[in-house]
Image (tube, rainbow, N blue to C red):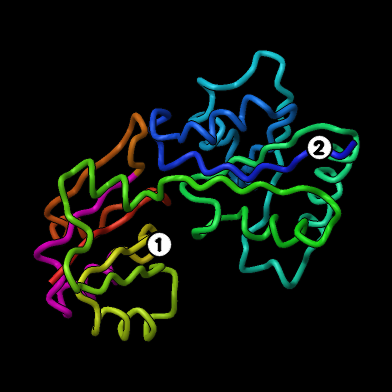
Amino acid sequence: MTGTFFGIGVGPGDPELLTVKAINAIRKADVLIAPKTEKKEGSVALSIAKPYLKDDIEIVYQVFPMVKHFAEDTAAWEANKAEILELLKAGKNVAFLTLGDPMFFSTYIYVFRLLEHEDVPIVTIPGIPAFAAIGSQVGYPIVEGNDILTIIPATARPEKIDKAMEVADNVVLMKVYKNFDEIVDKLEEKKLSGNAILVSRAGLADEKIIRDVPKHKGEALNYLSTILTRR
């Protein structure tokens, strides 16, 4: 009998933000897939889920190359897919842990696409995205009334970011670690810097909250950094 593949969003960092459904799925799993990058050891998603792991859970670390190279070289992805399918066909329930929500800027989306046409049951369990947790934690209404919320990956092309900011009422900027200085300049140009708040590694032990964002221009940021702002 084929096992079930669970895609589980573990939220931004606080283990208490996992849903009951996510915790139940983790406890049903025989194997946990913990995604990691080529450059770093360990898995943030796994550390968040750690309080809910069974003692005998099997943990499999899989390296997922940067998504921008996905179309150029799928070898690593296909190898990961084959490993997951082998586990499922052995009758094991397999859980893939991902930060935030599985269908929101997540590596899980690519794993899901690799598996969705295979003859295996898939259950995707939502998680709290970082920007939602940040808004509640720092008392910052993300959007209200008839305001339009625009979610922008700071890794997008500059001209796309410029157009999105131009028409936005409220903005969530994700992945601001690489071009933070340019993003600050753009926020000031669009008169969006005054209400900006930046949170890095939300809910984790080394969380950083920055309320005077322009004054921190030039600082190095962690990959898990998000800016909320509004006009």
Q: Which mark is residue 136?
A: none
Magenta-span inclusion, residue 182: yes
Q: Secondary structure at mark 1?
A: loop
Disc 2 from disc 1: Cα separation: 39 Å
Task: Write down the region rendered in magenta.
Answer: 181-200
Of the two numbered discs 2 and 1 on the same chain, state the one appearing first in sequence. Answer: 2
Residue 59 screen position, x and y as percent: 70, 28
Which amino acid type corresponds to the residue marked 2 in the rendered image?
Gly
Q: Quadrant of the N terminus?
A: top right
Amino acid tagged 1: Lys
Residue 144 is situated, as x and y percent measured from the top left of the image, at 18, 64
**Above/below status of 30 relative to 167:** above
Q: Residue furthest top?
A: 55
Count all numbered tags in the image, as a single digit: 2
* Quadrant in the rendering for residue 228: bottom left
Neighbours of disc 1 within 10 Å: few (<14), some (14-19), many (20+): some
Query: Residue 186: x percent and y percent?
Result: 23, 76
57 shown above or below 183: above
The image shows residue 115, relative to residue 7, as above or below, that is: below
Report the residue that reaches farthest toward the left.
194
Q: Which residue is mark 2?
A: 3
Which residue is label 1 attached to? 178
Give the crowd class for mark 2: few <14, some 14-19, many >=20 residues within 10 Å: some
Considering the numbered disc 2 on the image, is that residue within a helix, a strand or a loop?
Answer: loop
Check residue 14 for magenta coloring.
no
Compared with 59, 70 (above or below) is below
Residue depicted at 67% across the width and 60% down the height: 110
Which sits in the foreground, 41 or 52?
52
